């Protein structure tokens, strides 16, 4: 893991082969050096070709848990939000790659509970302060094929107008 001071971190998580992939006789082509945060992808059949190598801010292989990811990556970001900073966790990947598994998670085993319920628990624990009121707002948007939908809206099929720039403001010390 890198020093943790940069404002954007990119981490990669590799999921195990699913039943369909196993039935097809697919082979795992990805390996990781977790200490160096490196990821290696080999081309099947190309024994003479060196694997392609990528380095990230954090690497998570098939046997690692969302709990570990949360503690190492998300915890500090959510803690920052409770101190007044903005924070975003963005899961990106092709269909079936494990975005929902990481963000929503499963209740069993507990170590694989998702980032979203963990973040909610974290926030609500932090604001349990006597004689102080907090306002917590949540929105849940899906961006799919360049269309945006409000998943908490009354009509989740309705497309929202995409007419904004993402503005991120940081206090200057
Ligand atoms: N780290 C993991 N360990 C075990 N199983 C996993 C892991 N990640 C994903 N899976 C399993 O892989 C399948 C696909 O994962 P998931 O539904 O999270 O993908 P997705 O990226 O959200 O897909 P989509 O974009 O189609 O919604 C699920 O059955 C999920 O349980």
Image (cartoon, rainbow, N blue to C red):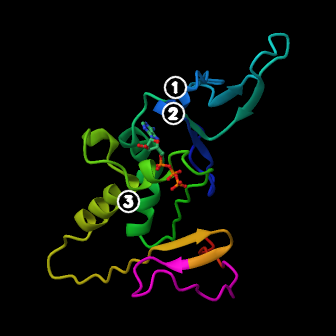
In the image, residue 42 lies in the stretch drawn in magenta: no
Magenta span contains residue 158? yes
Q: Quadrant of the C terminus?
A: bottom right
Pointer 2 or 3: first along the chain: 2
State which quadrant residue 92 falls in. Answer: bottom right
Q: Quadrant of residue 35?
A: top right
Residue at image location 49% in from the left, 30% down from the top? 16
Q: Quadrant of the N terminus?
A: top right
In the rendered image, residue 134, in percent from the top left (x then y), is placed at 28, 81
Q: Who is closer to the viewer here, 3 or 108?
A: 108
Q: Is residue 96 visible?
A: yes
User: According to the image, label 1 marks what residue?
Assistant: 23
| Cα separation between marks 1 and 2 | 5 Å
- Residue beneath disc 2: 20
Q: Which residue is mark 3?
A: 116
- Tell me: 164 left or right of 75: right
Q: Residue at x 70, y 35 (%)?
A: 55
Please say if the residues under marks 1 and 2 sit with CB atoms less than 8 Å apart.
yes
Q: Position of residue 81 (x, y in %)?
A: 43, 67
| Mark 1–mark 3 distance (CA, rounded to whole Å) | 32 Å
Q: Are marks 1 and 3 in contact (CB under 8 Å)?
A: no
- The range drawn in magenta is 149-166
Picture coordinates of residue 45, whole percent (x, y): 77, 15
| Near-viewer residue (134 or 12) | 12
Q: Of helix, strand and loop, which mostly describes the magenta segment? A: loop
Which residue is pictured at 47% across the width and 58% down the height?
Answer: 77
């Amino acid at each position: 893991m890198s020093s943790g001071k940069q404002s954007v971190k990119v981490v990669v998580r590799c999921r195990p082969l699913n039943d369909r992939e196993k039935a097809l006789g697919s082979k795992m082509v990805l390996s990781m050096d977790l200490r160096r945060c490196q990821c290696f992808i080999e081309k099947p059949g190309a024994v003479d070709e060196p694997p392609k190598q990528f380095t990230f801010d954090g690497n998570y292989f098939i046997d690692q848990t969302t709990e570990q990811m949360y503690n190492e990556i998300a915890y500090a970001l959510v803690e920052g939000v409770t101190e007044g900073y903005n924070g975003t966790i963005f899961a990106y990947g092709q269909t079936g790659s494990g975005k929902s598994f990481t963000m929503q998670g499963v209740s069993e085993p507990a170590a694989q509970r998702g980032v979203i319920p963990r973040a909610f628990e974290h926030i609500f624990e932090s604001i349990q302060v006597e004689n102080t009121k907090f306002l917590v707002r949540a929105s849940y948007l899906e961006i799919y094929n360049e269309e945006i939908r409000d998943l908490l809206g009354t009509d989740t099929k309705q497309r929202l107008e995409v007419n904004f720039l993402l503005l991120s403001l940081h206090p200057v010390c």
